[in-house]
Image (cartoon, rainbow, N blue to C red):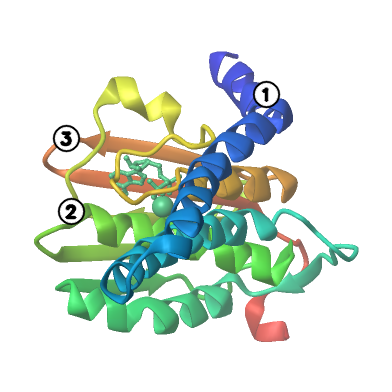
Amino acid sequence: TEELLRKAEKLNVAGQLAAGIAHEIRNPLTSLKGFAKLMCHAGDDNKQRYYTIMQDEFNRIELILGELLILAKPQAVQYLPHAPLTILEDVIALLNTEAVLKNVLIEWTYEADLPLVLCEQNQLKQVFVNVIKNAIEAMKDGGSLMIHVRRCPEGICLTFIDQGHGIPEDRLPRIGEPFYTTKEKGTGLGMMVSFTIIEEHRGSIRYESQVGVGTTVSIFLPGQEGNCQSSQ
Ligand code: ADP
Ligand code: MG
């Protein structure tokens, strides 16, 4: 029940979120206003310097809004049967270059005849991107990311096992809180968005971690019964 309460709190983030967004965007905006003013009277040398700082601030706003856009749902979201494996494959292809550059080896295994999942493909893609990026970012000196996809009583389970720095136990409940980040350039929005998306798919996310050893993220999604990948 404690976990249920925690989830309820996570879903009830609208007010907290609005306040957070306002705050996170006001900071770069204030800075932009200041530098725009300075620009007016600056010589060419300084103009270039101010411009570079302003670019960073613009990028920051863009990053924050970009992470939230996936939740904005401009059109009706369509849940269609998809093979999570195919979606995962796309995401790995997308992130593999970045992984290789950071000395991270992504390996994966999967069971045959996995059920299809009723899902919004792009949202699920976003969740996998967020989880894999966090794993890569946690392995500063490289390492391996193992991904297992298998059947479970709920339907399907995806496990992401990294060899990163891990998360202290008392910090685990904070993951998924809007703007909770331990990274210098983090937004702290990735997992909040991911938790929301998975909840909307009637699934769940579980974190297990050991400092200095690594983190395991498990995503459970309900399967569409009577269907399996090979029948598509
Ligand atoms: P961000 O990546 O922008 O910091 P997230 O919501 O994606 O925001 O993650 C929030 C925080 O959770 C991270 O800053 C990090 O401290 C922690 N975290 C998430 N995944 C992992 C992981 N695989 N290994 C270690 N820490 C993690
Ligand atoms: Mg992240």
Determine if residue 42 is in view.
Answer: yes
* Residue farthest right in this picture: 76
**Any mark on residue 163, and which?**
2
Identify the residue at horizontal 26%, vertical 64% (top origin): 145
> Alpha carbon of mark 2 to alpha carbon of mark 1: how far?
30 Å
* Label 2, ligand 1: CB separation under 8 Å: no
Specify which label sits upstream in the sequence, 2 or 3.
Answer: 2
Residue at numbered disc 3: 211
- The answer to whether residue 139 is left or right of residue 218 is left
Residue at numbered disc 1: 8
Nearer the observer, 180 or 103: 180
Q: Decide: is 220 above or below 48.
A: above
Q: Amino acid at mark 2?
A: Gln
Secondary structure beneath label 2: loop
- The answer to whether residue 136 is left or right of residue 74 is left
Q: Amino acid at mark 3?
A: Val
Q: Decide: is 14 above or below 205.
A: above
Secondary structure beneath label 3: loop
